[in-house]
Amino acid sequence: MSRINRARIVDGDQTTAASLNDRFDDFTQPNEVNQFNLRDSAVDLPQIQKSPKFQAPFIQTDVLGKSDMLHAAPVSVPATGSTPYSFPHVIQDGAANPTIASYGSGGLSLTAGDVLRIYWSLSVRADLSSSPWDDGFQFNEIAGTGGGGNLNVSTSAGCFVAWLQWDVTSNSLTNWTEVPGQSDFKNALGSYHGNTLQLCQATTVIPLWSYWLRNLNNGDASSGTTAETKAMGWRGISGAWHYPASGSFTVFGLRVVLLGVMHPQRVSAGAANTLVLDIGPAASVDLEYTGGRLVTLVNKVK
């Protein structure tokens, strides 16, 4: 620990510019001013040069998706019809140009004590045809004793997912992989492919429809029971991912990708909850999107 040993100024001492500067210079020793020789609140903003960036040294905002406020010509993403899938959809500008966050030739360098905080948003809408809530395993068959017989009741759990990928290899931005805590929904889970929820730490879930029943007779189906459905209209979705750096590394780019239709699933009793790809309703589901933002923020916590 560095120790500053300088006599106190007492009444009658002559003050000079040199002696005052000496006292400030005592505090400029590299890596020696720490919790052992400064009390809480000893340093405040007026003592920090260029103070606005000392706690958040890096902030960058990038356009995500297509800038189309009136949704005149949104980007359409068809649901995936094979499992495991080949590639997710990379969010783009409507002209096949991926919209990503990139950090120049040298990348964004982080060290221990930094927290990388990423936020994303997007405007989305479900475009449905036929009855996707009756396909795949998007429903449960409910036994009924009324005149309507058994019913296939949708779980309303069908969704798309958006998740975060990064390139920490080079500024060529050709080595995309999932960020820590996130997997790619290609894990074999019984006869399906997806992620356990533990591996969805950088995932946004995007619901596709709502479903309800009318004219039930004491909770039982009757000849007048009807199913009502509604596709999810335009709305904003968002996500966040925070990563405390344990050592030095460089991020060259970040992007958000899409995949659907997904559904929650559990392989067996007591097994982990999962989110898996259901190809049954693929022909009846598209996800449309327009614009949003991808925000990169670095915080200093030490």
Image (cartoon, grey):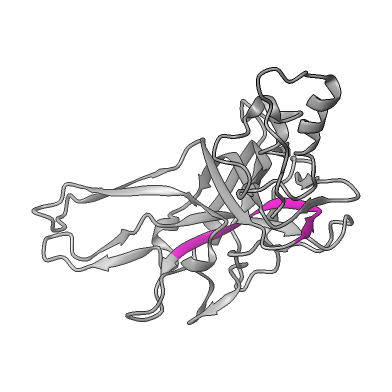
Q: Quadrant of the N terminus?
A: bottom right
Depth check, front residue: 142 or 240: 240
Q: Is residue 276 visible?
A: no
Q: Position of residue 16 (x, y in %)?
A: 82, 19
Residue 262, visible in the rendered structure: yes
Vertical order, 13 against 151 (above or below): above
Front residue of 145/43: it is 43
* Image position, residue 284 (x, y; %): 52, 55
Q: Is residue 252 left or right of residue 82?
A: right
What secondary structure do most residues of the magenta stretch adopt?
Answer: strand
Q: Nearer the viewer, residue 171 or 107?
A: 107
Residue 203: quadrant of the picture: bottom right
Residue at image location 67% in from the left, 40% down from the top: 295
Question: Is residue 110 one of those drawn in magenta?
Answer: no
- Residue 257 sits inside the magenta stretch: yes
Part of the protein shown in magenta: 248-263
Residue 94, percent from left and from top: 74, 40
Name the residue at 79% across, 25% down: 20
The residue furthest left is 218
| In the depicted structure, whether residue 158 falls above or below residue 194 | above
Above or below residue 23? Residue 268 is below
Would you say 40 lies left or right of 103 here? Answer: left
The structure residue drawn at horizontal position 79% and vertical position 60%, both measured from the top left corner, is 168
